[in-house]
Image (tube, helix red, strand yellow):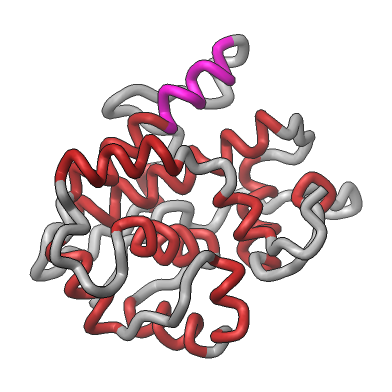
Amino acid sequence: MNVGKTLFAQVMEFVPWKTFGRIVERHKADAGMRTLSCADLFRVMTFAQLTWRESLRDIEACLAANQTKLFHMGMKASPVRSTLADALERRDWHIYHGLAQRLIARAKALYAQDPSVLELDASVYALDSSTIDLCLSLFDWKTQIWCAVATYVLIAIVKKELQLEASLYTCLQILSVSIFEKTEISCALQPDRSQREIANPANQLILFDF
């Protein structure tokens, strides 16, 4: 049971943190960084994707408004916009590419018997390209893309490992409005059978307009 843990914290338990740590160490990515580690940046970007934040200003405002809940995200404080921008500029995108690839491999193994649900390889994702808004900034946007891909695949893994009947879209919708709720994730991510799913889902992969 995960009584007392937010839905976000429970989702984060499915991240292969030891593997991610080895990737970070291999790139020496946290060396000399005094704020916002690679892991914290991933947590922030995952939060942004799941709650559909559309800019760094949006992320900053939302996290600042939920300061008391950040501990349950695994963070000590809300990063300011300049810190986020600096982290996105300085972090090697290969770190998040490596994490995404690890998650993709795990998802492919889980969905081996049902490839139509999730078709993933190094360059093909179960994402509607029409939902991808490429808002290029002054710094490398690949980190955003790979964090978004990793987030999407992570939820697919959660759905499969918990054997949830809800569609991936429904899981994403529920998380978007209840990320800080403290309830068992297997109970929370269930479809409301009285509701029909919207034909055109909202953005699942958002790149921020700075």
The residue lying furthest to the left in this view is 138
Q: Please name the residue shown 61% across and 68% down the image.
A: 72
Residue 135 versus residue 4: which sits nearer the camera?
A: 4
Q: Is residue 188 magenta?
A: no
Quadrant in the picture for residue 116: top right
**Residue 10 locus on image (x, y percent):** 65, 52
Q: Within the magenta stretch, is there residue 107?
A: yes
Please determine whether, in this image, residue 189 is positioned above or below residue 209. above
Q: Quadrant of residue 155?
A: top right
Question: Residue at coordinates 57% horizontally, 19% vertically from top-left?
Answer: 111
Q: Nearer the viewer, residue 86 or 167?
A: 86
Residue found 61% across the figure and 63% down from its top: 176
Is 103 left, or right, of 95 in this rendering?
right
Left or right: 125 as drawn, with respect to 71 = left
Q: Which residues are magenta?
A: 103-112
Q: Residue furthest top?
A: 113
Whether 151 is drawn above or below 141: the answer is above
Q: Position of residue 87 (x, y in %)?
A: 21, 68
Q: Residue at x 40, y 83 (%)?
A: 60
Q: Is residue 14 above or below residue 42?
A: above
State the predominant SS element of the stretch in magenta.
helix
* Quarter of the C terminus within the rendering: bottom left
Residue 153 placement (x, y as % from top left): 48, 38
Where 15 falls versus 4 (above or below)? above
- Number of labels in the image equals 0
x and y percentages locating residue 203 in the rendered image: 47, 57
